[in-house]
Image (spheres, helix red, strand yellow):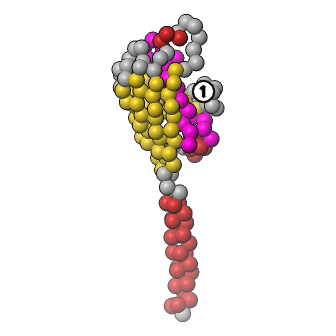
Amino acid sequence: MQAVRSVPSVVAITIILALTSIVYAQGPQTFKARLSPVPVDATNQAATTGVGAVTAVLTGTKLSISGTFSGLQTPATIAQIHVGPRGIAGPPALDLTVTKATSGMLRGEFTLTSAQVDHLKRGRLYIQVHSEKAPEGNLRGWLLQ
């Protein structure tokens, strides 16, 4: 009788172990963005210079972002992750830490919602760095695999 009772327990443990290995087998996914000047009009074109590169690593729902930028005309003020299809501006979703200088680093650690993970995987999240003379955005780049 003892052997009969333990069979369901063994089956349950086997299923749990199998599902756990599937979750961990996915591993981290890496996304990259090349930061370039935001499309501008003639009034602020001179203020939107610079370049940058960002790497984002998604592990489960945890997103780690690190990057660098250089060549801004004035110091960076903020950096954010925005939601929007490639080439189309969208609203900010998350704030990054950024060096308040014309060259520097940006970074952030986040737990994403399932919708944010979906946006990331579909190429609908982008990084935007703002500067003193380009408060609407100086550099921008979509996170892509």
Which of the image's four quarters has the C terminus? Answer: top right
Residue 61 x %, y %: 50, 48
Answer above or below: position of 142 versus 30: above
For disc 1, the marked residue is 90
Residue 96 x %, y %: 43, 31
Q: Quadrant of residue 39?
A: top right
Q: Nearer the viewer, residue 27 or 51?
A: 51
Residue 71 horizontal side relative to residue 87, left or right:
left
Answer above or below: position of 27 versus 106: below
Q: What stretch is highlighted in magenta?
A: 122-145
Q: Which of 47 and 137 is in front in this view?
A: 47
Residue 93 x %, y %: 53, 32
> Residue sitting at 51 percent across and 24 percent down?
36
Residue 109 horizontal side relative to residue 34, left or right:
left
User: Under tag 1, what secondary structure?
Assistant: loop
| Tag 1: amino acid | Gly
